[in-house]
Amino acid sequence: MTTLCRPAIAVPEHIITLEETLELARSLHGQHQQLGLVLRLIENTGVRTRHLVQPIDATLRHPGFEKRNALYTAEAKERVPDVVRRALAHGEVTAEEIDLLIYVSCTGFMMPSMTAWMINELGFRTDTRQLPIAQLGCAAGGAAINRAHDFCRAYPEANVLIVACEFCSLCYQPTDLGVGSLLSNGLFGDAIAAAVVRGKGGSGIWLERNGSHLVPDTEDWISYAVRDTGFHFLLDKRVPGTMEMLAPALRTLAEQHRWDVTDLDFYIVHAGGPRILDDLSRFLSLPPETFRFSRATLTENGNIASAVVFDALNRLFEEGKISAPGTGLIAGFGPGITAEMVLGRWTAPPQEHGAPPDAARFAPVGRTSTEPVGKPTDRPAAAPAR
């Protein structure tokens, strides 16, 4: 049975509060005709703090797309290894036991992908398969879990590592003055997440069924305009209402598995904003507390794009109140408008809710880390056949 293990999460050290965000909006856009609306929208996001890879004064400067993308690359290479090390420890596997690397990001561009750098520097095998996901936006966290699930169903003894690296602050565009853009400036944050998906062994969530749904004729509701200055995020005012169209897809997936979407034990969904969570509660007839993990992510970190589902999932592990075999739903929402959904069953025993296994044992073995001091005993005898 395919198991999604506990994620590892990291947020940068530079913090901006709601109060600081509102003051910046007033000082930078004091003459904006819709400033009052913008301030109300930012306050209503529920976001109280966000984490940034640079201090706010550096974030507000735009040195050009080339330098911004170079900064993305440098920050990713600096910050990803520790998150990978902790995720491998949670999954109780070594870098050499990973058969597929999935790297997810919509906030920077690299070719070769970050997966190639990870193989060279972090001790993954040279025959490790690579799957970069770059154009699914906030839905990509759910998509990565689903592709890992598919891979492990095809190769039942395989192990997959997912890494989501999102530096949304590097997409700040000072000349974008539309209400949607100014709202985004107060909504998005930076974070890195990683998680192991195991085809055999491990503890966490057994993945049982996944699915995808695209809402027709909504391609331009969430999009990037790629210009000389980089990625310009475009957000249609109709986006907050998309849960009315996506909630039936969640219900249908559960029904196909003979589950009742209103009677599950945990719900981990993308927290793009408070209305998404409020509307899901309404359209699925669920109490607001149902989405407490996603709401906590939004409050403390903002919308961290593809990393949201992993941060919210980690909070589920931390709370440790679900008893096996509790049933649940994980869903990412993003451009398209797309939903990537998976149903699973909780399997982690209570004693694993606390400290993770010895991280040094499962550390990457490349030039940036130390040798692991042991190996799990259930490693597949061979990598999946090509």
Image (cartoon, grey):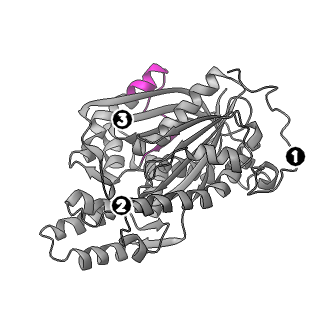
Query: Disc 2 on helix, strand or loop?
Result: loop
Picture coordinates of residue 238, whole percent (x, y)? 21, 45
Check disc 2: other Cα within 10 Å, few if <14, some if 14-19, many if 20+: many
Q: Is residue 96 above or below residue 80?
A: above
Using residue 125 as the reference point, say whether residue 291 is left or right of it.
left
Q: Earlier in the sequence, mark 3 or mark 2?
A: 2
Kind of residue at badge 3: Thr
Q: In this view of the protein, which residue sits in the foreground, 216 or 68?
A: 68
Q: Residue at x 48, y 50 (%)?
A: 308
**Residue 264 is covered by the magenta coloring:** yes
Kind of residue at badge 1: Gly
Residue 338's label in the rendered image is 3
Q: Is residue 88 above or below residue 69?
A: above
Q: How far apart are the two marked residues, 3 and 1, measured between alpha carbons?
A: 42 Å
Q: Quadrant of residue 333?
A: top left
Please name the residue that numbered disc 2 is placed on: 187
Span colored in magenta: 251-270
Residue 245's label in the rendered image is none
Residue 374's label in the rendered image is 1
Q: Do we see residue 188 in this rendering?
A: no
Q: Residue at x 54, y 36 (%)?
A: 145
Q: Residue furthest left?
A: 33
**Residue 70 is covered by the magenta coloring:** no
